[in-house]
Image (spheres, helix red, strand yellow):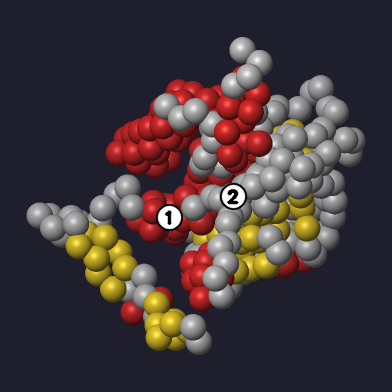
Amino acid sequence: MRGVVDPTTIRYLPWLEAVVLVDLLDVDTDEPVTVSPRRILQAQVEAAAALGCTSKIGSEVEFFLFTHLVFKNADKEIAALHGRSATFMAKPHFDDAGSSGHIHSSLWSADGAESRVPGEDEHHLSDEFRWYLGGLMATARDFSLLFAPTVNSYKRFLPGSWAPTGIGWDTDNRTLGFRLVGHGAGTRIESRIPGADANAYHAFAATIAGGLHGIRERIEPPVPYHGNGYTATDLPRIPGTFVEAIELWRASEVARAAFGDDVHHHVLTHAVFEWATFNATVTDWERRRYFERI
């Protein structure tokens, strides 16, 4: 493959001369590499345009709101210049809350000029945006690998941890996977599922794909949940382990239809290899717990 510079991404940086992102093309066919993260997202943007809409998205990497992909790299480079290291692990320490990467998304016309969120009055959502929300919730479990891509990711989803465990929604309920925020054209849905370790391209693509699935299938979201999502017994649950997420993705026809066979296989292969690599390692915890006790 070869990289083709995207001139719209050139940024001049105070700690580095400049940074630019590239798109990957197959050297034999000159076609985009379908499994590259940027192409995965571009394909979903194109799918939204085909439905006459676009999704505006903001990432929330703790504790920086509406940052772009360059931020993580910048943080690590600046830390290194000062002899430090920065991590975006979802759960670097078990006694801390963890590091999230919430995603805010809304629905707009294809040209981005008209919000498709408000309904007939301020107390209602449009049909399209209701279905968009329904799709996000319906695909949350199947798309978990794109929001939480590592073994460590799933140690963040604990009751009372500020990370959600139940897939529900409400206007201001931080115990749930989704939260409706904002007013008027600024109304958007916040997905609290992704961790800071998520690949932004994958997580944004999964957000758009889930919403589009809801629009195509006219999926109505459930009624808002006003209780404690951690103790709820009637809510679907975010996968509790990396293995559960792998099996959900493996069996997901929605994921295969949304992203195509190549991307589905690529994400699955990566996750299976990650799990196998983890299982081939003896951890410090095992040594501390078993070395003298066994």
Question: Which of the image's four quarters has the N terminus?
Answer: bottom left
Label 2 secondary element: loop
Depth check: give the residue in front, 18 or 191. Answer: 18
Residue at point 52%, 61% (across, down): 54
Residue at point 83%, 50% (across, down): 171
In the rendered image of this protein, does residue 232 appear above or below residue 13?
above
In the displayed structure, does residue 263 sit left or right of residue 67?
left
Q: Which residue matches tag 1?
A: 41
Q: Amino acid at mark 1?
A: Leu
Question: Is there any visible trace of residue 173 in the rendered image?
Answer: yes
Q: Which residue matches tag 2?
A: 89
In the rendered image of this protein, does residue 26 appear above or below residue 233?
below
Mark 1 residue crowding within 10 angstroms, few (<14) / some (14–19) / many (20+): many
Q: Amino acid at mark 2?
A: Met
In the displayed structure, does residue 29 sit left or right of residue 146?
left
List the single residue furthest toward the front. 292
Depth check: give the residue in front, 217 or 97. Answer: 97
